[in-house]
Image (cartoon, grey):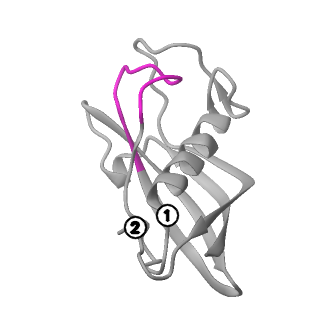
Amino acid sequence: MAKAKVIFQKLIQDSQDYGSDDQHMVSRAFFTVNIEGNVTEDAYVDIKQPVGSDFETTPLEVSKPVGYNGPFNYEAFRQATEGYYRSLVGSQGSGIHISGGGNIRMQNNTFIQQAVAEFEVSKESPAW
């Protein structure tokens, strides 16, 4: 199996430009993918969360990456993306420190912070 290295670079939290509305907050994470020296830059994924939900426990909906369509492991990627998001927004967040849910809503926050995730992918059976 090949190993993927995903380098998250930026998160834009809760943006109307990406589809946020009264029901869902939509954020976007930007990243680079490196699989065995094959590098894809400027990829991104949308992250969807119900408005008013708990920032710590509510599962996040992570879209298929845009700008990358090679071999992948969606579940490992989803977990890495959720970890990146929660490292910036939530009770452990270094960008916005929020505990619980409720009526907290801050929009269009941009975080420039790098995080690296590595996981195995299968070239024979991509997870898409």
Q: Position of residue 23 (x, y in %)?
A: 25, 31
117 lies above or below 47: below
56 lies above or below 71: above
Q: Earlier in the sequence, mark 1 or mark 2?
A: 1
As drawn, the label of residue 73 is 1
| Amino acid type, residue under disc 1 in the picture | Asn
Q: Is residue 53 left or right of residue 111?
A: left
Q: Position of residue 118 (x, y in %)?
A: 69, 61
Residues under labels 1 and 2: Cα distance? Answer: 5 Å
Callout 1 secondary element: loop
The part of the chain drawn in magenta is 47-59
Callout 2 secondary element: loop
Question: Which residue is located at x 69 percent, y 25 percent?
Answer: 92
Please say if the residues under marks 1 and 2 sit with CB atoms less than 8 Å apart: yes
**Quadrant of the rendering where the C terminus is positioned:** bottom left
Question: Which residue is located at x 41 percent, y 33 percent?
Answer: 59
Secondary structure, magenta segment, majority class:
loop
Q: Is residue 118 left or right of residue 121?
A: right
| Amino acid type, residue under disc 2 in the picture | Ala
Front-most of 14 and 33?
A: 33
Q: Is residue 94 left or right of residue 51?
A: right
Reply yes or no: does residue 53 show up in magenta. Answer: yes
Q: Position of residue 87 (x, y in %)?
A: 67, 36
As drawn, the label of residue 119 is none
Disc 2 residue crowd, few under 14, some 14–19, many 20+, Cα 10 Å: few
Question: Which residue is located at x 57 percent, y 62 percent?
Answer: 30
Front-most of 17 and 94?
A: 94
105 lies above or below 64: above
64 lies above or below 23: below
Disc 1 residue crowd, few under 14, some 14–19, many 20+, Cα 10 Å: some
As drawn, the label of residue 127 is 2
